[in-house]
Amino acid sequence: MDIEYLKRQAADAAARAIELRRELHKWPEPGNEEFRTVDIIKRALEDTGLQVRHLLPTGMVCTISGDKISEENQNEKAEGMKNIALRADIDGLPIQEKPKLPFSSKISGYMHACGHDVHTAVLLGTAMVLSNNKHLLNRCVKLLFQPAEETMGGAERMIAAGCLRNPEIHSVYGLHIKPELMAGQVGIKYGCVHAASDMFRIYIKGLGSHGASPEEGVDALLTGCNIVNHLQTAISRSIKATDPAVLTVGSFHSGTAGNVIAGEAILEGTVRSLEKNVSDAIRQRMEDIVKHTALAAGAEGRIEFTKGYPELVNDDTVNNRIVKLAEDLIGKENLIRINSTSMRVEDFSYYLHNTEGAFFFLGSGFPYRENPPIHSDNLYINEKCIETGILMMSALCLYE
Ligand SMILES: [Zn+2]
Ligand SMILES: [Zn+2]
């Protein structure tokens, strides 16, 4: 397919996709409650002549089959071309937006501060390009509109609901905005892109007493403070310096009054690591620290872990394909190799634990101005990135 033709198609679709992104931006919604967002997506796809299928109350797939593919052989690779899924996450964040824009969030305390409005708009623009060019499409493409990336791992439930089956998906692609890169650029990371997470909650049971008579009680608050301190050694003294890991205690609740010894404390936090054996070792150290620090104070301590998202590891072969296409479409100078692994998490990792695929970054920054990071209440997107996103996603589907 002629590259110039595809670029024109992407530019045309981007004009409409930017309007849709602004509409989505006005209505950021919490995970699993993206009902208005779903309506906007459905209407946009219907305008393009496409239908969606609900897999979850706010999770949908839209299947686009190339003209060369009959209903019967949807499950097979059409003439050697793999069935592809493209994923957009659609949820917003509980953040009050600062920039005053004509399309600023209309939902108080919520904002598309992670760019999921952009990811959704890119997919809607890609749907327009693919729908206009079904005669050139030699595979089956599924667009996944997934809820609750930020909170409850919508990806895992989309997979459980069958988003990678009927027709079977052979490769899955996802992208994420990156304000540190400029619009027009694409970032790629080989190997591990994002960490795995564990959440933990620590319960400390002491004994309440008068604030003037600590000897009559067991101070759960002080025990909690000691545990927070000792947890700082769980990584620094037990894990090799070359194995990246992070431990953060992010909340601490204890006590009811200034003149009372607190009888209980509850602490919450997260652990990030890149490998299971590292996360297992940290977990063991944490259990020991909590139990024994509490015991030394005469209190009881216990820790509960909840498994978070797994680590996100890109497939080299799929990455090579993205690199090759990006070099042809946007030029070598605009393809940025990312070397460091992020300790953040991303539930796209679930797809990659089920099928081959890759996750890449879409520059969304402006030259000559400050570009606040994702999850900032000041996030401000250079919408030119939407055209680049559509171009990349469409090419991944239309090219061999
Ligand atoms: Zn986010
Ligand atoms: Zn995100």
Image: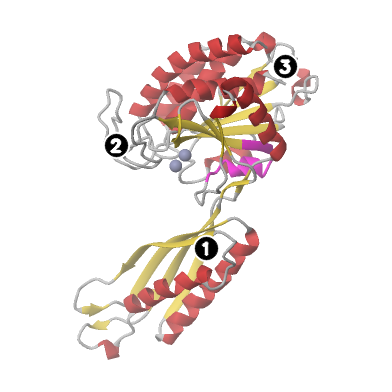
Some atom of ligand 1 lies within 8 Å of the CB belonging to the residue at label 2: no
> Residue under circle 1?
305
- Asked if residue 196 lies in the magenta stretch, the reply is no
> Residue under circle 2?
97
Q: Quadrant of residue 274?
A: bottom right
Disc 2 element: loop
How far apart marks 1 and 3 lie (CA) works out to: 46 Å
Left or right: 325 in relation to 387? right
Residues at marks 1 and 3 touching, judged by CB atoms closer than 8 Å: no
Q: Is residue 355 visible?
A: no
> Looking at this view, is 124 or 302 the one in front?
124
Q: Which mark is residue 36?
A: none
Amino acid type shown at disc 1: Phe
Left or right: 135 in relation to 45? right
- Residue 396 rendering spot, x and y as whole percentages: 64, 24
> Looking at this view, is 57 or 309 the one in front?
309
Disc 3 element: loop
> Residue under circle 3?
138
> Looking at this view, is 153 or 238 the one in front?
238
- Residue 217 rendering spot, x and y as whole percentages: 30, 86
Q: Residue furthest right?
A: 79
Q: Which residues are magenta?
A: 346-358
Relative to 247, is 98 above or below?
above
- Residue 269 rendering spot, x and y as whole percentages: 43, 61
